[in-house]
Amino acid sequence: MKVSDHGFFTTTQWTMVQAAAALETTSAQQALSSLCERYWTPLYFFARRHGLSEDAARDLTQGFFTFFLEKRVFERADRERGRFRSFLLTSFKNFMRNEWDRESAVKRGGSSTLLSLEFERAESLYRIEPIETRTPEQVYDEQWASTLMDRVLRRLADEMRRAGYGTRFRVLRRFLTESTRGEGYREAAIELGISETAVKVAVHRLRKRVGQLLRTEISDTVSDPRAVDDEIRCLLEVLSAR
């Protein structure tokens, strides 16, 4: 199986899970750890919305991923059964009900941190989110959508920077996440020293690229290609409701 220069599998996330289940290699474990890091923030939000304190949610999330990897829970993942995010949330709920013992968090996780989880950043985000009227499942979906969109925008920013258009992306990025008005295009045109028409064309191309990257990211987490459109619709609905 091909491995990228960064040591992660250049295949789908489901394939990462299957490869890690089958292979006892450093690359496989790195790939799986990378996959887990993409989902820990939504699970942390889920735990906090369930009423857990900051410390308890942190220990729970870390304990879950330690358990998920050490006990090879990922071996139970069946790609034919749907979305990886659904499998992970179900596993997390089961862990909360059946496996979690707050007093054994240190014993289970030891003194080392398996994943580099930015808990302070996650908690600061959680505190500013108006989530008191939403269920833990809704909060999980919202954070999943936000995390996924952030990942796509980071990828696009890297692409633009490598192509020599870092400044252009910095100026135009807001048009990808905010509703825009005519004066916004004019201001961007003045800042970039190009025509307003050129700004609109550039934004159109960026939006198209965002759609392509979203499709790529989401296709990695579903078993049926036909489900990609459903996931994209779900993501856009979640983001528009924020």
Image (cartoon, rainbow, N blue to C red):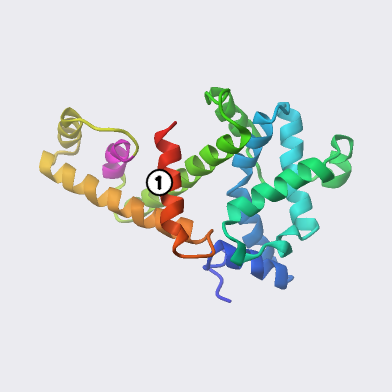
Q: Is residue 49 left or right of residue 239?
A: right
Q: Where is 227 relative to 40, above or below?
A: below
Residue 234 visible to the viewer: yes
Q: Residue at x 17, y 48 (%)?
A: 201
**Which of the 4 image quarters holds residue 184?**
top left
Where residue 41 appears, x then y in whole percent? 60, 40
For the C terminus, the quadrant is top left
Is residue 169 inside the magenta stretch?
yes
For the N terminus, the quadrant is bottom right
**Which of the 4 image quarters holds residue 140?**
top right
Q: Please, which residue is most extreme toward the bottom here?
A: 1
Give the residues drawn in magenta, as a range: 167-176
Q: Is residue 227 left or right of residue 124?
A: left
Q: Residue at x 65, y 65 (%)?
A: 78
Where residue 183 appears, x then y in whole percent? 16, 28
Amino acid beneath label 1 = Leu
Q: Secondary structure at mark 1?
A: helix
Tell me which secondary structure the magenta stretch mostly adopts.
Answer: helix
Q: Which residue is mark 1?
A: 153
Q: Nearer the viewer, residue 168 or 62?
A: 62
Q: Nearer the viewer, residue 192 or 217?
A: 217
Residue 164 visible to the viewer: no
Q: Where is 163 relative to 40, above or below?
A: below
Q: Where is 99 relative to 221, above or below?
A: above
